[in-house]
Image: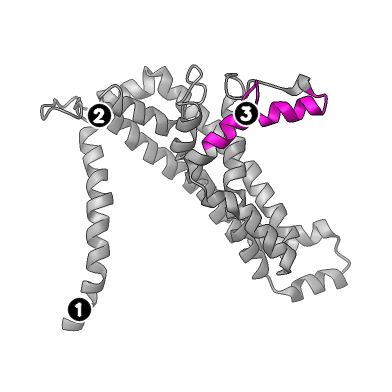
């Protein structure tokens, strides 16, 4: 018993930090979500589920932010997962060139989100940006767009930046998963006369699926938390076309001073993230079982 008490001392600091910085804020957000607290004065009133009802039935901006988040997430998850897996397949061998290329692709990940936002805001500039200049040099001016000013494409323009930003990070996870696959399985597939696609479908994908589960789940969470990138590039504009749940919560709390309402948004935000991640995990697990 005394030994167990001593062991508890090792986890006590981490547990204390977890309680202070995660459990307490989470419970506080849940509590304030049932109030009309303005975040400044100590006075507030309980409003029950009014904040949640208003969010779901009346708040059109919340609905738009959620729709934008889904668009952003789908674009990033699909393209980032596919690109990182393709790069990993080409760079799986530990040659000097491949190691250099992995480091090169990983480099954007170590940059701050604000730095990346400023770089790509300049690249997307419709007048003197690098992308417009490149299209002009290639006589493709017809493809030039107001990448961050057009409501129809702004969210996808930022999603493309997110893919560029984190593909190298997911690449490393896939490389680790691919290198863990026994080479004997590929030799058997080659002896059996399997094509490259058959080898990938029956050997590579089933065994790299655990890594894919991590990549997709992590990418989904990143997509819902891309506050700094979007806020630095567009602040949610134009006309809320790049507003996502994270930026909407910030605006509600720190600009409108509706902390009770923002707390309700945060609770729904956590629930939505949990549900989407769970569905993805179950779908990928079922896919692995089918193999």
Residue 196 position, x and y percent, is 83, 59
Quadrant where the image shows the N terminus? bottom left
Q: Is residue 175 left or right of residue 198?
A: left
- Secondary structure mostly seen in magenta is helix
Residue 288 against residue 77 in the figure, above or below: below
Is residue 1 among the parts visible in the rendering? no
Q: CA distance from mark 2 to mark 3?
A: 34 Å
Pair 3/1: label in front = 3
Q: CA distance from mark 2 to mark 1?
A: 42 Å
Q: Which residues are magenta?
A: 117-140
User: Residue farthest to the left?
Assistant: 43
The number of discs equals 3
The residue that mark 2 highlights is: 259
Residue in front for this viewpoint, 119 or 223: 119
Residue 251 position, x and y percent, is 35, 26
The residue that mark 1 highlights is: 6
User: Residue farthest to the front?
Assistant: 128
Label 1: state its secondary structure: helix
Q: Is residue 218 left or right of residue 192?
A: left
């Amino acid at each position: 018993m005394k030994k167990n008490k001593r062991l508890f001392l090792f986890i006590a600091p981490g547990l204390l930090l977890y309680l202070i910085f995660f459990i307490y804020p989470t419970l506080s957000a849940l509590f304030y979500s049932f109030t009309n607290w303005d975040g400044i004065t100590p006075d507030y009133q309980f409003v029950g589920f009014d904040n949640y009802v208003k969010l779901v039935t009346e708040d059109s901006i919340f609905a738009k932010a959620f729709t934008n988040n889904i668009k952003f997430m789908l674009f990033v998850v699909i393209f980032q997962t596919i690109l990182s897996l393709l790069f990993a397949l080409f760079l799986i061998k530990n040659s000097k060139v491949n190691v250099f290329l992995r480091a090169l692709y990983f480099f954007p990940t170590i940059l701050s989100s604000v730095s990346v936002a400023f770089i790509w805001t300049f690249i997307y500039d419709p007048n003197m940006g690098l992308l417009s200049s490149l299209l002009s040099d290639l006589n493709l001016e017809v493809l030039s767009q107001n990448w961050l000013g057009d409501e129809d494409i702004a969210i996808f323009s930022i999603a493309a930046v997110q893919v560029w930003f984190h593909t190298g990070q997911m690449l490393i996870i896939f490389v680790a998963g691919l290198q863990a696959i026994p080479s004997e399985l590929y030799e058997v597939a080659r002896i059996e006369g399997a094509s490259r696609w058959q080898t990938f479908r029956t050997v590579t994908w089933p065994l790299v699926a655990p890594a894919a589960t991590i990549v997709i789940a992590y990418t989904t969470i990143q997509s819902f938390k891309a506050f700094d990138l979007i806020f630095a590039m567009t602040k949610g504009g134009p006309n809320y076309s790049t507003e996502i749940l994270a930026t909407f919560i910030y605006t509600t709390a720190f600009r409108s001073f509706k902390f009770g309402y923002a707390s309700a948004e945060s609770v729904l935000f956590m629930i939505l993230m949990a549900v989407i991640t769970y569905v993805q995990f179950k779908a990928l697990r079922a896919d692995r079982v089918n193999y």
